[in-house]
Amino acid sequence: MKFFDRLVNRIEKGEVPFSLYVFTFLSAITLRNFLEYLVAQIHVKRLEWDVPVHYALFYISLGLSIVLLLHLMSGEKIEKVARTVSVGFLIIATVPVTDLLLQIIWRYPITYLYMVPERHEDILRNFLLFFGDHLGAPPGMRLEIFCAMLFCGLYVFSKTKSIIRAVATGVLLYIIIFWCYMAICYLTEWLENALGLPMDTTDRMMMDAYLFLSLNTLIALLYLFKKDFFKAILKDISLSRVLHYSIMAAFGYLIGYNCGGTGFNGLPDFLEAYFLFAAIVFAFLFSTVTNNMADIEIDKISNPKRPTVTGKIPLDIYIRIGFISLFLAIIYSFAAGYMVLFYTLCFICNYFLYSMPPLRLKRVPVLSKAVIGLNSLVIMLAGYTLAGKDILNFPPGIAAFVFICFTLCSNFIDLKDYRGDMAVGIRTLPVMMGMNKSKLAIGLLFALSYALFPYFFGMQEIGVPFIILGILFLFAINKKNYKEGIIFGIYLTSAMLLFIYLLVKGNIV
């Protein structure tokens, strides 16, 4: 036990950069996949790109789950646990070698397969008998899992000196590996039956499943790693703006479906819709980080509670969070589809031009808000393509209305930054016209947009409610005690109600 403790302490010391542990973890996965192809006699030439990616996502998701489990059971810091798990993951490369060596004395088929309902009727029996007669888990794999249970139990015991916790850790690890990984096809079948969807165990389905598990486990780990950073980022990201773009994506999908697009025909369609919204969040977080880094002097006046001003998150870590968000936005938008990736990159690049030098278009009165109007349209097109539609078929009237109205109305976001923008010479509408005149102009733009919407799209039955909403915007913007949150609240509520109405009505365009 003392040797084990010394080994763990040496790994956790932190003298080696954490990035090298990440590469060690990824190297172990790559080595395992390579050896598995050789030993299991998989025809590598006939492999599509999604097969090795699917396997890699399997191990990445599993690794994150083990880090979360060991952190919760041992109470050790997540970074230290992650270092140990990354090195310990080298055990997965031993499975094909062990199975190959056992062939000398014991001939058995070497196959690494999921447990699927077509081949295994008694799932509980397999679970209680350590995979039972499951051919997809040969002796090498079972030995690997037993060793992982043993090592994880020893790790928790070395940290807590609790035999009960150590045993519970080993059992929980086995439960996670069996139900969330080896028998995941059963879980997807149960879920698909509940939703009335067809059974799907393709590589696409498995990749989506592990991306889903990885994302949610990663979010849990990030929250537990630095709760104060996590909460600061949530406050910084502006939930109202994220909801706006999420609603644009939902409207885009609804328009695409109404124009003859595909609905949610399988569980992967639901997961990829989730990935689109995740990509929006991460893309907007990256854009928020870059914008705030460029606006530090302005925010000292207008937004003194931002982490770039308060120092709650060190700037180097804040920048790192931004680039991690960029990476996740690319990964999850790609998982949702090639065109969704393209639109996500367009969204990010447009906001970069808006916020960052050398162009910093937010200083140009018309172009600054045209970026927001364009990005609203871009995300709507992402939702449209998620429904399987080509953007060349997107209704031009809707595209023009969305771009023009959001370009004009989005000037309200500059009202709260009036003093800061004036101090550094950014020519926004409130700076050029003054607060009172700009409030009146922006309020009238809202009122006009809401009044025209029902008649522009042939929905006269909602004309009166939308005129009332427009007047409500006019009064809310021109209140003496102006609050941006009220404007977002009215807009988001009306947009969600409109979405529900169109969903029920069915005929949109």
Image (tube, rainbow, N blue to C red):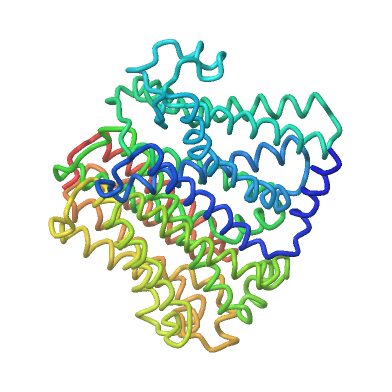
| Image location (x, y in percent) of residue 509 | 16, 48
Residue located at (44% from left, 10% from top): 122
Where's the N terminus, which quadrant?
Answer: top right
Could you say which is closer to the camera, residue 426 or residue 273? 273
Q: Which residue lies furthest to the front in this view?
A: 104
160 lies left or right of 415 = right
Number of numbered discs: 0
Residue at the (34%, 39%) spot, across then down: 41
Q: Where is residue 328 in the image (x, y as percent from the top left)?
A: 47, 57
Judge by depth and name the residue closer to the eye, 463 or 342: 342
Relative to 380, residue 134 above or below: above
Relative side of 108 to 152, left or right: left
* Residue 269: image location, x then y, percent: 31, 39
Residue 477: percent from the left, percent from the top? 48, 63
Q: In this view of the protein, can residue 333 be seen by the observer?
A: yes
Residue 444 visible in the picture? no
Q: Is residue 294 above or below residue 493?
A: below
